[in-house]
Image (tube, rainbow, N blue to C red):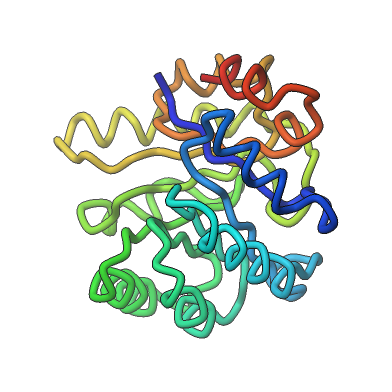
């Protein structure tokens, strides 16, 4: 059974505390924190996501799955460290070179957090293979990052299969997470491709029954 990381991007501010509580009761495995800076991606959610992450930490012991869609990776890692998230994911494409990627991985690990790299739909798996032994997880974007409610790009499922095959052949226990367009229709496809964690936002938050929506995905 896969785990579900619920994206809280579309949660309404006035009912946020109740929604976070209801998501925990409904059985989400993680809260997915979509941090966007308005530069790496168009949307800016920095203020809202930090506020939401703080509310969650005060009321829940469930792990935070922080996804940084930002240009200034180090600054944002530092911002979230005091909240002790379970996972911090940064984008390969936000780094100038491999040395910078390695610096971020090392820094996240040194602070007792699980490091993860995300790649956009157009980025090849080859680019991140050398980092896999050091990573807890790889987040494969199944849509272009920065907007909620997009449809899953079918070609990205092949990327999941390619990564899964490589991890098995090299005896690596790196997790695979996908983010974008995951709903009860598309989840079967990514599950069969070999994912461990699925990020779902709209399909859960817009559902009348969170528990039913999460169970259907699992």
Quarter of the image where one finds residue 59: bottom right
**Residue under the image location 62 percent in, 72 percent down:** 70
Residue 111 rendering spot, x and y as whole percentages: 28, 75
**On screen, 77 above or below 155?**
below
Residue 125 rendering spot, x and y as whole percentages: 42, 46
**Residue under the image location 58 percent in, 45 percent down:** 141
Quadrant (top left/top right/bottom left/bottom right) for the N terminus: top left
Q: Nearer the viewer, residue 209 or 140?
A: 209
Q: Nearer the viewer, residue 22 or 10?
A: 22
In-image side of 18 versus 171 (left or right): right
Q: Nearer the viewer, residue 112 or 115?
A: 112
**On screen, 166 above or below 99?**
above
Quarter of the image where one finds residue 48: bottom right
Residue 50 rendering spot, x and y as whole percentages: 63, 71
Residue 74 rendering spot, x and y as whole percentages: 46, 82
**Residue under the image location 33 percent in, 40 percent down:** 175
**On screen, 68 above or below 166?**
below
Q: Nearer the viewer, residue 89 or 155?
A: 89
In-image side of 202 versus 165 (left or right): right
How many marks are shown on the rendered structure?
A: 0
In-image side of 75 versus 48 (left or right): left
**Residue under the image location 64 percent in, 65 percent down:** 35
The residue at the far left in this view is 171
């Amino acid at each position: 059974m896969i785990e579900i990381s619920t994206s809280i991007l579309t949660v309404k501010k006035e009912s946020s505390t109740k929604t976070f509580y209801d998501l925990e009761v409904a059985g989400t495995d993680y809260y997915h924190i979509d941090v966007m800076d308005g530069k790496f991606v168009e949307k800016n959610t920095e203020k809202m996501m930090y506020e939401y992450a703080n509310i969650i930490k005060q009321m829940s012991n469930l792990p935070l799955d922080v996804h940084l869609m930002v240009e200034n990776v180090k600054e944002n890692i530092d911002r979230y460290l005091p909240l002790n998230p379970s996972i911090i994911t940064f984008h390969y494409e936000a780094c100038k070179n491999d040395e910078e990627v390695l610096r971020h991985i090392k820094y996240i690990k040194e602070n007792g957090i699980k490091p993860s790299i995300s790649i956009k739909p157009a980025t090849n798996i080859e680019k991140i293979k050398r980092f896999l032994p050091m990573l807890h997880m790889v987040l494969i974007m199944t849509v272009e990052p920065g907007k909620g409610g997009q449809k899953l790009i079918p070609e990205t499922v092949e990327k999941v299969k390619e990564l899964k095959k490589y991890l098995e052949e090299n005896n690596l226990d790196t997790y695979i997470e996908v983010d974008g367009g995951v709903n009860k229709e598309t989840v079967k496809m990514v599950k069969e491709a070999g994912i461990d964690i699925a990020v779902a936002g709209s399909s859960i938050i817009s559902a009348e029954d969170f528990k039913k929506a999460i169970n259907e995905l699992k």
